Amino acid sequence: MNRSFSGVSIGVLIGALGCSAVAMLFAQPKPSSPSPATGKVATVDVVRTFNEFQRQKDLDDELKQIRERLELENQTRQQKIDAVRATVDAMDPADPNYGTKLRELQQLQIDYKVWFETMQAGIAREVAVWTSKIYVEISKAVGELATQQGVDVVTYREEFQPPGLEPDGVRNAIRQRKVVWSSDACDLTQQVVEKLNTAYRAQPKQKMIQMP
């Protein structure tokens, strides 16, 4: 005998719930089909967008301040190493304190090398991380503008600049280009820059680079 709850058997209740779930599943509206392609194409000068995006400008300012601070520390460390080296050079190797001072110099040089390489790697990592983040932000803004204006494809716009007078270099530069020509009328660069800066300036300003 099925155990019942409020006069309804558990088996019947589960069956009813199952049927309801299946009915709801099939009753859900089908996702709307994507809008038909318009065939419209636009271009964006990504390099110009980076250069005129206020976030990139602020990032450059942060990097400049960090490099200036690190350069001061670099000079201080170098001066200390030079001073100890001068002391060691002036000492008689037979001096009982010569070995201690030499080891001090060696430790300073090791510490300097570790510090220098760590700072270089840290800056490179932060630049790579933020370059990726900014590009994603640019891509999102481009996508939103393209969708609003019914554009299907946005290509990378750049002016052709020969890298030099080496024939192979010129040919390679030509091969690497994806767009031979585009009309200024389909260029979204200025709109993208304005959209990015408007959104960025509306946010509270925060420090981007995280370095000790």
Image (tube, rainbow, N blue to C red):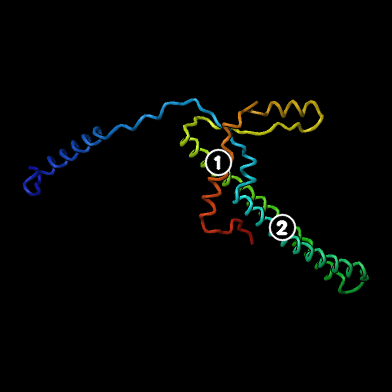
Q: Which residue is mark 1?
A: 191
Q: Tell whether 155 sits left or right of 16.
A: right
Count neighbours of disc 1 (C-alpha within 10 A) and say few if under 14, some if 14 to 19, many if 20 or more: some
Of the image marks 1 and 2, the number of the one nearer the N terminus = 2
Q: Tell me the quadrant of the picture where the N terminus can be found.
A: top left
Q: Residue, x 55% and y 45% (percent of image)?
A: 194
Rendered view: 126 above or below 182: below
Number of labelled discs? Answer: 2
Q: Position of residue 175 (x, y in %)?
A: 69, 26
Q: Which residue is mark 2?
A: 67
Quadrant housing residue 176 = top right
Q: Tell whether 112 sits left or right of 193.
A: right
Count neighbours of disc 2 (C-alpha within 10 A) and say few if under 14, some if 14 to 19, many if 20 or more: some
Rendered view: 90 above or below 110: below
Rendered view: 190 above or below 87: above
Q: Position of residue 162 (x, y in %)?
A: 76, 31
Mark 2 residue type: Arg
Disc 1 from disc 2: Cα separation: 33 Å
Q: Tell whether 9 sits left or right of 174.
A: left
Q: Residue, x 42% and y 26% (percent of image)?
A: 36
Residue with the most extreme front position: 185
Q: Residue, x 64% and y 62% (percent of image)?
A: 212
Quadrant housing residue 44 = top right
Along the line of sight, which residue is nearer the eye, 194 or 174? 194
Q: Position of residue 180 (x, y in %)?
A: 65, 26
Q: Position of residue 103 (x, y in %)?
A: 81, 67
Mark 1 residue type: Gln
